């Protein structure tokens, strides 16, 4: 290999090995700089005889072009590498799924409550709310359950310090006190018409909410939900209870062939009283009787405590358990799942 070829060759090697642009420019200076090898060779041409100058000059020029070519190639390589590096660092994977904002959802029991409210609203019932800290009077006495009544023992609850109108305070054991509260307010609003013997618009209300008892197992929780229903007028009978509650259950469970059974029972505030059982005709619970509510014709003493004359007013009441309705609707077997706050369970609704 002649001297020029090996010069070109060493420029090639040096340039290819230059890791950075700065290294490359320093390497370039060795060949093409002011006192670089090629520059020196060019200067040396001046002293050569004319003939030799021509051929030697062409050869040096060719070497210079080759070295410049190698330099250009390496510059392009380094620029591309720098660009690739930047692109990799700033890469965006547009195929990644987007980050969604986790939408909250309603608790399954709230879904049931809303469902109950919308079904009864469509039947002309209004929705009332009442206090969870209730007086002994509204929770028991006004509901025909005096202090020594044995039915009180089934409603063991949590007592709260203080009193209201001389009666002790407690966490309400059922939503039934709302029967009295709502009816008393309703009667007060229509007192004028009543006193003038003009009658009164019917009381037709449901009262959903939280209730409390000293009870805890797979089907009982110290805090649970109830929904009370009350319809009082001049001739509201057990037949109306059967029709409206049957309608409600069939709509709630979306099952037209659902069968209801009114099983005689006892509650101090109704006479006669009945437990309401339902039976599905298909699905996993088909054929079994499942208790969903207590109900009955409102007791005359309770009508009286509402401020009405039992000779003129009558009606029915019921109290059901939205927690149990939720368990039946979704096939949940342990009530406690509703109140553990475990998102793996709650996210399924
Ligand atoms: N309050 C009753 C309970 O918690 C349920 C109940 C039964 C409510 C009969 C009613 C009713 O309104 O008429 O056990």
Image (cartoon, rainbow, N blue to C red):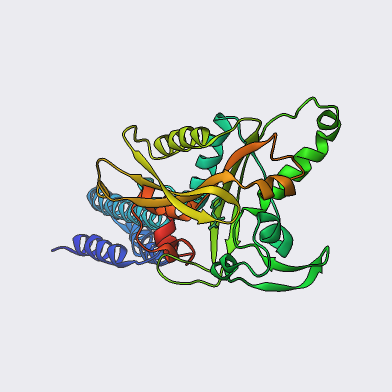
- Quadrant of the rendering where the N terminus is positioned: bottom left
Q: Look at the picture and state if 172 lies above or below 331.
A: below
Write down the quadrant of residue 134 in the picture.
bottom right
217 left or right of 232 in image:
left
What residue appears at the point 61 percent right and 52 percent down from the top-left corner?
A: 269
> Between residues 22 and 3, which one lies in front from this camera angle?
22
What residue appears at the point 39 percent right and 54 percent down from the top-left corner?
A: 327
Q: Which residue sits furthest left? A: 1
Write down the quadrant of residue 200 in the picture.
top right
Q: Look at the picture and state if 265 lies above or below 309.
A: below
* Residue 91 visible in the shown view: no
> Between residues 271 and 59, which one lies in front from this camera angle?
271
Write down the quadrant of residue 308 in the picture.
top right
- Residue 307 drawn at (x, y percent): 77, 44
Q: Which residue sits furthest front? A: 311
- Residue 55 drawn at (x, y percent): 22, 49
Q: Look at the picture and state if 2 lies above or below 258.
A: below
> Between residues 169 and 329, which one lies in front from this camera angle?
169
* Residue 206 visible in the shown view: yes
What residue appears at the point 38 percent right and 45 percent down from the top-left corner?
A: 94
- Residue 150 drawn at (x, y percent): 57, 68
- Residue 14 drawn at (x, y percent): 29, 67
């Amino acid at each position: 290999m002649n001297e020029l070829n090996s010069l070109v060759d060493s420029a090639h090697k040096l340039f290819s090995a230059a890791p950075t642009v700065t290294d490359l420019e320093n390497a370039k200076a060795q060949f093409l700089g002011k006192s670089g090898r090629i520059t020196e060779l060019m200067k040396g041409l001046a002293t050569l005889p004319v003939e030799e100058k021509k051929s030697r000059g062409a050869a040096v020029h060719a070497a210079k072009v080759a070295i410049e070519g190698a330099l250009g190639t390496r510059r392009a390589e380094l620029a591309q590498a720098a660009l690739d590096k930047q692109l990799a660092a700033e890469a965006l994977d547009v195929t990644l799924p987007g980050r969604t904002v986790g939408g909250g959802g309603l608790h399954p029991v709230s879904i049931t409550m809303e469902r109950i409210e919308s079904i009864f609203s469509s039947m002309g019932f209004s929705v009332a709310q009442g206090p969870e800290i209730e007086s002994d009077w509204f929770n028991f006495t006004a509901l025909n359950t005096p202090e020594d009544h044995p039915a009180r023992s089934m409603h063991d609850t949590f007592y709260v310090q203080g009193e209201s109108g001389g009666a002790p305070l407690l966490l309400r054991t059922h939503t039934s006190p709302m029967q009295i509260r709502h009816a008393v307010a309703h009667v007060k609003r229509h007192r004028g018409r009543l006193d003038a013997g003009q009658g009164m618009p019917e009381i037709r209300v449901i009262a959903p909410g939280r209730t409390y008892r000293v009870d805890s197992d797979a089907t009982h929780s110290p805090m649970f939900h109830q929904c009370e229903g009350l319809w009082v007028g001049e001739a509201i009978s057990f037949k109306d209870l059967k029709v409206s509650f049957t309608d409600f259950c069939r709509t709630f469970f979306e099952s037209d062939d659902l069968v209801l059974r009114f099983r005689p029972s006892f509650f101090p505030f109704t006479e006669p009283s009945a437990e309401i059982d339902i039976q599905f005709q298909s699905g996993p619970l088909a054929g079994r009787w499942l208790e969903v509510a207590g109900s009955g014709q409102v007791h005359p003493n309770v009508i009286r405590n509402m401020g009405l004359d039992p000779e003129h007013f009558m009606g029915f009441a019921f109290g059901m358990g939205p927690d149990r309705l939720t368990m039946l609707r979704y096939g949940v077997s342990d009530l406690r799942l509703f109140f553990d706050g475990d998102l793996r369970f709650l996210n399924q609704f």
